[in-house]
Image: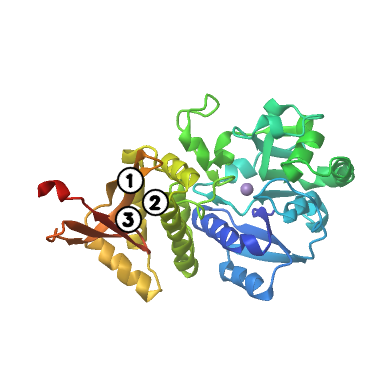
Amino acid sequence: MDHKMNICFICDENYVLLTKTAINSLVKTQKEKLRIYIIAVDLSDTSVAQFSQFLSKNVEIIILRQKNIYKDMNFKHPYITSAVYFKFIIADLLKEDKVLYLDGDIIATDDIADFYNITLGNHYAAIVPDLVVEKEDIETKKTNPNLYFNCGIMLLNLKKIRQDKLLVKLNEHRLKNPSTKYAEQDIFNAVCQDNVIYADYRWNYFNVYEWKDYAELSESRNKNLIHYAGHKPLDNVFYPLTELWLKYVLPEDLGIVLKTIFTKFDKQVQNCLTGQENEFEKIKQSVGDLQKKTDKLNNLYQILAKLNVQNMLLLQKIEHLEKRPRFVWRLYEFIKSNRKKKLYILGIPIIKIKRNIRRTIKKIYLFGIPIWIHHKKKNNSHKT
Ligand SMILES: [Mn+2]
């Protein structure tokens, strides 16, 4: 009797860090033994080698190296890479009867055995509906938009998929519809929608669900598997549940992760001030509810402070942070197109130079890694 959970990831060079983080979250949260397959699409030796660190008596890692045969597929969606089409051939690559397929942009925060143990019977998969998909973009000829499911997390019945030669049907549909917006997902929906089990949202909880009320979600909003589907934590530190994802980033990756998210934030702020209107709107949106965001960033800071970081420079900065008070919001006002604009910046004040004769206020804010410098000159001509 085999008590292992079979897990499968597809990973190309763009997804190494995300996939490592996802695996780390599984290793940290699951009681069951894990057999993790990684379909490594055009992956370098260096990248492949990084996955061996997870090997233990409870974790098996099996790398299946593949050349990207789907390289030339067309996409309209910016986040989707052609490697997603390897989802079609999982049943051919793995000899298992059942596997839990996971995208790299997920983390497990709690036990997932109840999902894995769903009896699939004659169904192709257990999946979770997608609450945020833009319904007008779905390829709808054979799809019911209200039953549209997400393909980032699928408990797959590989035995049934092989028996019914589902790959042939998927490929036929792909060739007839070569440029669907949601790529492989539109095709899975069109071909399998009437033969899947719809599972609870806790097994594929999008981080952006935090932004809104959804009648479909239970009061408790359990999220055993969090999916950072369209809103990746690396893109914006304010996206929901980023602080949970950061908990599972490996220490070796933390330097680059923090640098990426904080540099992006810094750049957004700078673009605002140099007058790029839409950047301003974007950041205004992402700042949103100030109190909520402040609380969230304080959590984030707690996590950072606790992490054992190897990068000395980073460590010094985090130590420095520990001596500082909590994050504070600063309000900046500036004139753009003859209109007064307000901008909130989150940071920790580390230097405060008192007003000199010319009444120049200089403050330096430390926001994670980058140091944000803001000069503000006050017009004091009316004094004379
Ligand atoms: Mn995904």
**Which numbered disc covers residue 334?**
1
User: What residue is shown with label 2?
Assistant: 273
> Mark 2 or mark 1, which is nearer the start of the sequence?
2
Residue 258 percent location from the top left of the image: 44, 62
- For the residue pair 220 and 310, the one nearer the viewer reads as 310
In the rendered view, how is the structure colored? rainbow
As measured in the structure, the alpha-carbon distance from the residue carrying label 1 to the one carrying label 2 is 8 Å
Residue 228 percent location from the top left of the image: 55, 47
| Residue type (three-letter) at the residue carrying disc 2 | Leu
Q: Quadrant of residue 366?
A: bottom left
Q: Residue furthest left?
A: 384
| Residue type (three-letter) at the residue carrying disc 1 | Phe
Q: Quadrant of residue 292?
A: top left
Decide: marks 1, 2 in contact (CB < 8 A)?
A: yes
**Which numbered disc covers residue 79?**
none
User: What residue is shown with label 3?
Assistant: 302
